[in-house]
Amino acid sequence: MRVLLSFPTRIGTPGIGMIGWHQATGLARAGAEVHVACGSVELAMPDVGVLRETMRLPGGPRIPYRIGGRERAAAWHDRQVARLLRHGCAFDVVHAWPAGAALTLGAARAWGVPALLERPNAHTAYAVEVVAAECARLGVRLRSASPHAGDPARLARELREFAAADALLCPSDFVAATHAGRGEPEERLLRHRYGCDPSRFWPAARTRAQRARPVVVAFVGRLEPRKGVHLAIDAWRAAALRPGAQLLLCGAMEPGYERALQPLLGLPGVRLLGPVADPAPLMRRVDALVLPSLEEGSALVTYEARACGAIPLVSDRTGAPVRDGIDGLVHPAGDTATLAEHYRRLDGDPTLRGALRARSLEGRAELSWDAAARELLAAYAAAVTRVRERTPPGHAPASRARCARDAQPAPAHRPPRSMVR
């Protein structure tokens, strides 16, 4: 299968840049012919062709995003990729990431090529409403620059992208449900998922003392209202666990949120550790990861925790690869009473703790990016079938023109991450 992955920012940088990188390289390992058009390539991609770097001068340096802003850069990327596709489309699938996708998707559909839009988060209108309500309840003022601040122009642009796509690629059932709840037909919602790197996230053996000790739970991520850190601590207070139980809060603090958390941070066992450069060693030594988010797409930290042997204690809005009572414990978002009971169960029942951990690790191979690539290929195949089924009889297939010929292998060397903007 010939795939064009259109990514309107820098690929191979921390965050979504690494998701795009893992998608491209995973698809290539799975046997797809993969080409990318992106802002710039910041990490070598074996066996992946680079069609265009829209934020890099030809053969030269990168163009800083601060010059025109990310919105304008994404729009520029969209125009450039769409222009390439209008000259011909040599691909079986065009997979575009949001913010710079509407023209690209329209150009692909004009050739009869499935045009798929990645949806890494819940429906934006849903997310904005949920986060605004929780911030109002807490008395926290959301920054105007926050992606959850409610920008009508951004929402209008996303709605145009939804309309331009043949289907939306949803990395979790929760993401799909938020789009279905806003009127998207089920047949336009294709499921796939994300993953983790098993060479980096792996479990360590547990001693008898570790298996019997009071429970140690970690939160890993940005400390902000939408991730429900206040809910995690409220439930911790209600659980009244054994002396020695610990709740470790690891991540950068959202400005203004510390006022809502301050009365809770002095509770027994609660420790504020700040950002953690590499979460893998931490998750190998804790018993569980707590993530009581009010909305997420499919939180990568939940894949990483399971791969390290940390039991996920998650809300039903995290998009986590977790089955309640089998390889983790799931509570309804906002339900601190159920989360408190989950804390108590893990603290008071080492046998349950060991069983959940063992069953979680049994499925570790399916948490990898290679497994995610296989699911993504299956979603592509479903999209191809649907587009062919609706193609009128006698309609000639699009000519396969020059796009793929222009693609070049990714450069073998890139600047270290410390140099990435």
Image: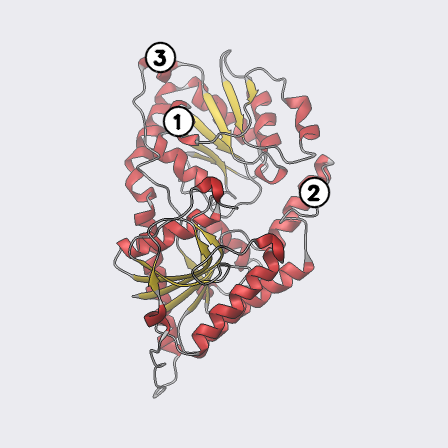
Is there a contact, CB below 8 Å, between mark 2 and mark 1? Answer: no
Residue 209: image tag? 3
| Residue 326 can be seen, yes or no | no
Q: How many marks?
A: 3
Point out the image quarter for the N terminus. Answer: bottom left
Mark 3 or mark 2, which is nearer to you?
A: 2
Q: Residue visible at 56% across and 20% down? A: 270
3 or 2: tag closer to the N-terminus: 2
Using the image, determine if residue 194 lies above or below residue 247.
below
Residue 242: % across, % down: 50, 13
Q: Residue visible at 37% across and 53% down? A: 23
Q: Residues within 10 Å of mark 1 (few under 14, many from 20)?
A: some
Residue 165: image tag? none
Q: Residue visible at 37% across and 34% down? A: 306
Tag 3, which secondary structure?
Answer: helix
2 or 1: tag closer to the N-terminus: 2
Is there a contact, CB below 8 Å, between mark 3 and mark 2? Answer: no
Residue 360: % across, % down: 34, 34
Q: Residues within 10 Å of mark 2 (few under 14, many from 20)?
A: many
The residue where tag 1 is placed is: 281
Q: Amino acid at mark 2?
A: Leu
Residue 403: % across, % down: 37, 72
Q: Amino acid at mark 1?
A: Pro
372 left or right, relative to 59 = left
1 or 3: tag closer to the N-terminus: 3
Mark 1 or mark 3, which is nearer to you?
A: 1
115 left or right, relative to 317 = left
* The quadrant where residue 211 appears: top left
